[in-house]
Image (spheres, rainbow, N blue to C red):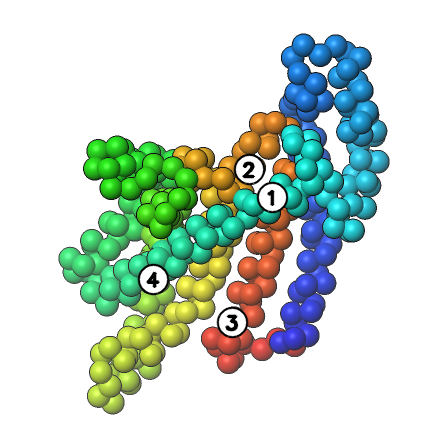
Amino acid sequence: MLRYAVKRILSAIPLLLVISLLIFMFIHLIPGDPARIIAGKEATSYEIENVREQLGLNEPLLKQYGIYMAGLLTLDLGNSIRNGATVFDTIAPRFVPTIQLTLLAMLWATLLGTLLGIMAAVRRGKTLDYVSMIIAISGISAPSFWLGLMLIQLFCVKLGWLPVSGLTTWKSYILPSFTMGCGVMAIIARFTRSSMLENLKEDYIRTARAKGLGEFFVILRHAYKNSLIQVVTVTGLQIGGLLTGSVMAETVFSINGLGRLLVDSIGFRDYKVVQALLLFFSLEYIVINLIVDLLYGVLDPKVRYD
């Protein structure tokens, strides 16, 4: 397994190089001139040109990319165009709120989604199955920005139970994490139900029941355990989606996390910060996929890594 992990890590290097090139070209194709934004509306053409030269924006794109890659290899991502601080110093304070929200959303979404999926599979065709799937379909269908606004209107404006924005107390995490995790919960519930229904039809389930094993033991020890690979796969993918999906929740709830920083940086044409954030989100997807692949060997002994 160690050899396989090393191979996957090494194979990710060319992928990251391609991603960095695509991100670099995408950022520079965004309309707008950061030099003009920094210089101000009243700036002359000469002043704008000086700012552009200081930022290195006059250089050919290929040379700019070379400078960017050289900095990336030395972990020097440059300075933010917006505030002059280093990219690391700009991103670091925003990292913790996003990770906290992501982990909290993933925790409750996984637990509730798994529970709903198991109950729906066990009670197939019954009222509990229909209720669980209605909840799942509703969670997938509801846009996160609309859901966030409705939650604010109900629990903050009308009832006054929870704070509207920021992360000042533990109550501040409830609505943003629910907004982020609602769709994930629904997807996990549907995948769990589908996988469980397939496994409940297998011969080993009938054999376990024929041996007199309790239904609770049969469901969890046999049916659910053999459904874990599919559940882990979709859960791993959804963790990556939560990090990138934090953009909407953090914007709606005015949370100073990575998602909101990305939106603000794009609006300000802060190339350095946007490139760093997009590269971070891409790296996070690669790492999560690697972890999921390695978990396959733990969950299913039949999986071998040569």
- Looking at the rendered structure, the kind of residue marked 1 is Ile
Mark closer to the observer (4, 3): 4
Mark 4 / mark 3, whichever is N-terminal: 4
- Looking at the rendered structure, the kind of residue marked 3 is Tyr
Distance between the alpha carbons at the discs numbered 1 and 4: 30 Å
Task: Quadrant for the N terminus, please.
Answer: bottom right
- Looking at the rendered structure, the kind of residue marked 4 is Leu
Q: Under tag 1, what secondary structure?
A: helix
Residue occupied by mark 2: 261
Residue at horizontal 74%, vertical 40%? 78
Left or right, residue 239 beside residue 141: right
- Looking at the rendered structure, the kind of residue marked 2 is Leu
Residue at horizontal 45%, vertical 64%? 232
Mark 1 residue crowding within 10 angstroms, few (<14) / some (14–19) / many (20+): some
Could you say which is closer to the camera, residue 121 or residue 256?
Answer: 256
Residue occupied by mark 4: 111
Could you say which is closer to the camera, residue 305 or residue 44?
Answer: 44
Distance between the alpha carbons at the discs numbered 3 and 2: 35 Å
Residue occupied by mark 3: 296
Mark 2 residue crowding within 10 angstroms, few (<14) / some (14–19) / many (20+): many
Residue 57: in sight, yes or no? yes
Distance between the alpha carbons at the discs numbered 4 and 3: 20 Å
* Vertical order, 3 against 180 (above or below): below
Mark 3 residue crowding within 10 angstroms, few (<14) / some (14–19) / many (20+): some
Asked whether the beta carbons under mark 1 and mark 4 sit within 8 Å of each other, the answer is no
Mark 1 / mark 4, whichever is N-terminal: 1
Residue at horizontal 34%, vertical 36%? 164
